Image (cartoon, grey):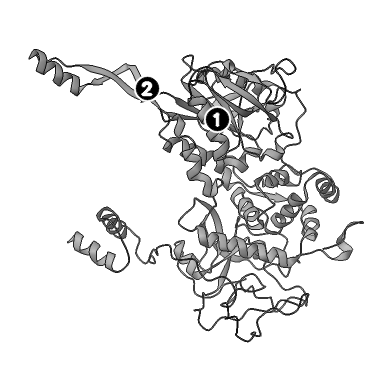
Amino acid sequence: MITRVTQVLAESGVELSQEELLDAFWLAGRLPRGSGPLARLAAPEAPYGPAEAPADAAPSPAEPGPEGAEEPHEPATAGQPDPGPARPVLSTAEPEEDTDAPQVPALPVRAPDGRVSGAGELRLGKSLRPLRQRFPDHRRHELDIARTVTVLADTGMLETVTRPVRSRWLSLVLVVDDGVSMVLWQRLAAELRALMERASAFRDVRVHGLDTRGGTPRLRTSPYTDSGRLRAPQTVSDPTGNTLALVVSDGVGEAWRDGRMRRVMELWARCGPTAIVQALPARLWDGSGIAARPWRVTTRRRGGPTRAWHVTDPVLPPDLVHFDSVAVPVLEPTPVAVGDWARLIASPSGTAVLPLWSPGRDRPGRPSAGASPGDGAQAVLRFRDAASPEAYRLAAHLAAVSPVTPPVMRLVQTALGPPTDPGHITEVFLGGLMHQLTTDAPDRLPHHRRYDFSGDARPLLLTAVSPKELLRTTRTVTAHIEAAVGRSPVFPAWVGHPDGSAVIGNAGRSFGWLKEELLRRLGIAPGGGSGTGTGSGPGPRAAGAVPDPAAPPGAESDGCGTATEPLLPGPDELPPGWEPS
């Protein structure tokens, strides 16, 4: 019977194994009553706007006019079904105080998050293959069937013969720095942990959190939590040299600059192989506490402590330059960097050029995350002078949808595309403009924590970009969410819905607009009506945001600002020297 059902499904274009079919039956029997069907991930939906017309067809009235002309509304295409109203999705669902904006009901939704490693995750896993070596473990033995049969045939006596079990030669201790700024790299740490556990290269994988807030760095049983017993760094040292210590950090914490973490890393490097995975892009390494420069490294045996490495300058002769510290490799989370390091660790003897943690002078730390007290205009001016142009542009886009969580920051940065990268998120986060909301519980998970800009800084940042650019970014974020449904990890968000139990105080700060079809795929049944702040189709108003008829002229919402909160401040509201874009 099951075989016949799978054959019928295969002929219909749905190929399922018998186990998958039984799982589907089991799940169907446990779904709550009245729940909608769980649709399979379909092909990408048609992009916003009308279908592409043939080259020889006459231009339609909806095509854009000359350069500089106002972008017209995009009418629904006759060949496409109406996707339904679009609903705003935000990072928070709390009513705003001291405002007359309408309160939009909202439902919780698990929005898909992007992967930090992206398409290179498979190649990153392949770069660890040199570590998949097995060697005889004389502490464990197993039955040698072939030799036992040979002895029985030669002597006629049933005598068992054993041999050492061939097992993996390395254990892994993954230490995740959980400082203030490392909340941005929680997804990277989670992906590295999953990658190491699936690599089949280690006997066991132990994960610890690194607490550097006290006098001496300590280890926790789990990262990103305040609970758990604190342990000394010596507890993970392995005198046998068969334990690899891998630290994930961005080097922003004070302990990376004042020498405390250097003493810890040297302790681990004296016992076994040790390395640091630098979360920041290479262009920001010199500004962190983990600056590195390339050195030529020669190993004398497989694995072993990195203290025993022979280090020379890759260009200058050894008599001119000396490396007067313990060698600690600093790796980018890329297949090339990890592959070169893994081949060097796994080879009995070899030579490679690797970036090593520079033994430079200890430098004072940079300011940590948190809004600077004082005038918001001065804080924005300081940030604009110190940050890169890409980080300043990213800050304006984040201010338009704030408060934001780390996954929303990554979605907005990904939507902007090159030349912005995750390092620019760190520039904004540590730029003295953002602060964590005080309403968040202390035990809130890292990717659930919400961050906002100060009230004075937000309108000034919004002058850096035009409303049309903000709308394009919102559409791109929505397209990324649609493409990632069912394929990526999720994070909590709130979507406007007439059946919601919570309320959204300002739908204009939404980072995306989800249509009814996508909401069904996310497990939310369609509501009865378009709801407040939604419309009938996409267009220049961010998926059809409807202006408030009671609002004064020129104050209607465009998907990034509301009638009660204009997108850009008026000329009389700007401080001296500021001009809107």
Is any part of residue 432 visible from this angle?
A: yes
Label 1's element? helix
Q: In the rendering, at what x and y percent does residue 326 appear?
A: 63, 18
Q: Are marks 1 and 2 in contact (CB under 8 Å)?
A: no
Tell me which amino acid carries mark 1: Trp
- In the displayed structure, does residue 40 sit left or right of residue 98? left
In three-dimensional space, the C-alpha distance between marks 1 and 2, rounded to whole angstroms, equals: 20 Å
- In the displayed structure, does residue 371 sit left or right of residue 230? right
Label 2's element? strand
Q: Nearer the viewer, residue 505 or 66?
A: 66
Is any part of residue 445 visible from this angle?
A: no
- Residue 268 vertical position relative to residue 248 in the rendered view, above or below: above
Q: In the rendering, at what x and y percent does residue 175 appear?
A: 54, 29
In the drawing, what numbered circle is on residue 18?
none
For image coordinates 89% across by 64% down, the residue present is 572
Q: Nearer the viewer, residue 478 or 6?
A: 6
Mark 1 or 2 closer to N-term? 2
- In the displayed structure, does residue 241 sit left or right of residue 315? left
**Label 1: few (<14), some or many (≥20) within 10 Å?**
many
Label 2 sits on residue: 135
Tell me which amino acid carries mark 2: Phe
Question: Residue 549's quadrant in the figure?
Answer: bottom right
